[in-house]
Structure formats: structure tokens, C-alpha cells
Amino acid sequence: MPAGIVLHVTGARPNFPKAAPVVRALDRHGVRQRLVHTGQHYDDRMSEVFFRQLRLPEPDINLGVGSGSHASQTARVMTGLEELMIAERPALTVVYGDVNSALAAALVASKLDIPVAHVEAGLRSFDRSMPEEINRVVVDHVSDLLFATSPDAVTHLRNEGIATEKVHLVGNPMIDTLLANLDRFDVAGIRAALSLPERYVVATLHRPGNVDDPADVVDLVKAMHAVADQLPVILPLHPRGRQQLENAGLLSHRALRVIEPLGYLEFVSLVRGAVVVVTDSGGVQEETTMLGVPCLTLRPNTERPITITHGTNRLVTRSTLADAVANTLTAGRQTLRPTPPMWDGAAGRRIAEIISRVLG
Ligand code: UD1
Ligand code: UDP
């Protein structure tokens, strides 16, 4: 790898819409880049479809690590990346979000004295029972450039003693991708393709805190059925929760339809046309905020509070979900609040300007 190369490390579904605008903007600066896919996610619907739809370049390297426990998955990414980084000595490694692939890459690079840039730095749920929270804290503390999507993230980093000159509020590259694709989201098309009525609910579920414990999953299924009593629900289901949710009887309600995960364009089209979204996804809280679609987040906390203060998001529990849906159906879409600062489609450009300047 020639000197001055920027090495992007991606691997899981939410990484791809964040990386696409950064890669594109660095390209415009003439920066030489390599894209690594760790293989953390590998199904076509969790991975390749994003490369096709978002016109991301084919990964230069796919480590093919696949699934496993946290330690084994993280270790496989680390071993693969260590060999690659020693051989190629990139000038900078860029990691995205809070997934195990980002953690592994940040640890390997920092120990090889290769600078690390963290896109989506500083988000905090303050809930260490989430594996992502541990990843966020560790990645931020070994990073040299911290790109924050919201002012609260900048505050958290300052409170944790991270030098302010490393931290840059740049906006949200996942929102760059959303805005760049607005005219490709075809609500009527997806509604027809899935034979959906005019009014429907979209759901996504995959957090360990929701789908891993069989006792909790029984209550979750009851809560989702209580939503389907009110309006048809369509649930493109992440592979993580599928078995447990099906074992708990998810499929037994005729107004609740489970489908495979959708490609990005199909999924955001579906969300755009929904009356309400029920989710535990981080990215979906942000996308609904921008689209003005009411979002009910099935979690006790969020590392993205700006989606509540500036967006459509509300936290709910299994027991409050059905009433929250009923209230939302009555209230309809609320007037849009001002969108979060710098969620304007130019985050990738800002990141690329800073990286180019730092690389010289
Ligand atoms: C990971 C991230 C999570 C993120 C989510 C996005 C970590 C710790 N978690 O969770 O923050 O919100 O991705 O989707 O990095 N599987 C497949 N096919 C695939 C990928 C996974 O069937 O292509 C199944 C496997 O059974 C696997 C399980 O999903 O064991 C979980 O995958 P994993 O990557 O370990 O974590 P996620 O739950 O996807
Ligand atoms: N997404 C998708 N198809 C789906 C579900 C989600 O394309 O069936 C997209 C969604 O629009 C967002 C990203 O995947 O851009 C969010 O990823 P995910 O919910 O898996 O992870 P999280 O954001 O919770 O880490």
C-alpha cells in the first residue's frame, strides 16, 4: 500500500451508509483509499446490497470473519487487520460507529501507532450492559480524530477528558446518505411490492436487550401483537432475533408480517411511508427524525437523545408500546422541529476536509 493511504474498516450493516459519503468525499480530494470489509455481516441483505445501492467501491480486502462470540469475532478481526496494517502501514485508519469491527480496528491501529479516526464519536447511552457502549468508550479513547454527529457527543468527550482539538462536530454521514438518496425512495413502489395498505407500521428489532432472553421475548411478542391489533405491522427481521421471536409465537398474528431484511432503498422507502416506526435500531432513530416519521424506540435509553429533542423519537417499554402507538395514531404526524445542527448532507465533505488537512 503506498504511503498516505486511508484505510476504512467496515463490517456491519450500519457501517455502510456511514462510510459511503466519507469515501466519496475523500475521493474528490484525491486521497488514496482502501476499503476493508471485516465480514462481520455477510448475508447479501446485510452487506452486498448496500455496496450496490450506495455505489460503494468493492472492498479491497474481505477478512471473512463471520459470526461468533464477542471475543472470538473481535479477535479474528484484530488478527486479520494486524497482518494487513503491518504490511501496508496506512497513514490513517477510519472506523465507523460502535460495532465490534470498529473496536477491533481501533485497538490494532492504535497499538501499531497508526492514527485512528472515529466517525460517530462521543455517543453515550451510559448503559454498560450494551456491548456497543463498551465499544464506543474504548474506540473514542484510542482515537486521534473524533468526528461527532451531535453537540451532546462533543460534551461527553470533553467530560471524559479527551483533548478538544481532536474533536470535530461535523454532522451525520448517515444523514448525508439519506439526503443524497431522497428521490430514490419510492413509497408507492414498496407499498405495491409488499401489497401493503395505505396505513401501516414498520418495525425492526435486533438489540440483545430485546431479543436474546426468551422470557423477555415472550413479552415483546405480546407487545408487538398488541400493535398489530391496531394496524398492520411489517417487520423486516434482523437474523439475530429471528429464532427466538418465532419460538415465542411472533408469526401467529395475521396482521403482523415478518420479511427478510430489506435493501437500504427499499427499507427507507418503507419507513418514509409508515404511520409509525417501532424500533431498537440506532440508525433508524436518526432516519425517522429526518423523515418526520414518528418513531417509538423500544429501549430504556438512547445514545442519540438529539432524536428526541430535535426529532420524532420517544422511548417506550414493552408495556407502554401499545398505548404509545394508539396515541401516535390519534395525534398523527407532528409539525417538524428544526433538524439537528449540521444534519445537512455535508458531513462527509467536512470529514474529508479535516482528514486531507491532517494528512497534509
Ligand atoms: C451488530 C452490532 C450492533 C449493530 C448491528 C447492526 C456488535 C457488538 N453489534 O449486532 O451494534 O446494531 O450489528 O445490524 O458489533 N447473522 C446472520 N447473517 C449476517 C450477520 C449476522 O445470520 O450476515 C446472525 C448470526 O447468527 C450472528 C447474529 O446474527 O451470530 C449476530 O451478528 P453479530 O454481527 O454478532 O451482531 P449483531 O446482533 O448483528
Ligand atoms: N436498514 C436496512 N434494511 C433493513 C433494516 C435496516 O437497510 O431491513 C438500514 C437502516 O435504514 C439504517 C441501517 O440499516 O441505515 C441501520 O442498521 P441497524 O439497525 O442494523 O444497526 P444500528 O443502527 O442499530 O446499529
Image (spheres, rainbow, N blue to C red):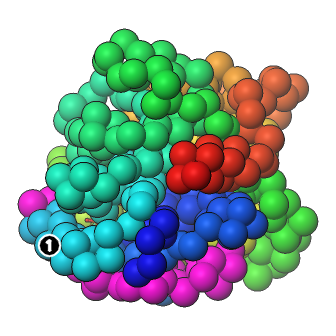
- What residue is drawn where x is 61% and y is 30%? 169
Query: Which quarter of the figure has residue 75?
Result: bottom left
Q: Position of residue 122 (x, y in %)?
A: 43, 31
Q: Magenta includes 12?
A: no
Tell me where residue 248 sits by quadrant.
Answer: bottom left
Q: Residues within 10 Å of mark 1 (few under 14, many from 20)?
A: some
Please give the name of the residue rendered at 47% of the width and 20% of the height, measured from the top-left corner: 164
What's the residue type where badge 1 is placed? Thr
Q: Nearer the viewer, residue 42 or 279?
A: 42
- Quadrant assignment for the N terminus: bottom left
Q: Reply above or below: 217 against 50.
A: above
Name the residue nearer the viewer: 175 or 259.
175
Disc 1: which residue: 79
Q: Note whether 131 is above or below 124 in the view shown.
A: below
- Locate residue 214 relative to residue 28 in the image: left or right: left
Residue 38 position within the rendered picture, expressed as x and y whole percent measured from the top left = 33, 75
Asked if residue 329 lies left or right of residue 303, the reply is right
Query: At numbered mark 1, what does the secondary structure look like: helix, strand or loop?
Result: helix
**Residue 313 rendering spot, x and y as whole percentages:** 62, 31
Q: Residue at x 46, y 31 (%)?
A: 166
Residue sitting nearer the eye, 37 or 205: 37
Q: Is residue 102 left or right of residue 235?
A: left
Is residue 283 visible in the rendered structure shown here? no
Left or right, 128 with reference to 145:
left
**Magenta span:** 45-71
168 relative to 181, above or below: above
Occupied quadrant, residue 311 = top right
Q: Total of numbered circles in the picture?
A: 1
Q: Is ligand 1 less than 8 Å from the beta carbon at label 1?
A: no
In magenta segment, residue 68: yes
Residue 74, how many percent across, how many down? Answer: 18, 63
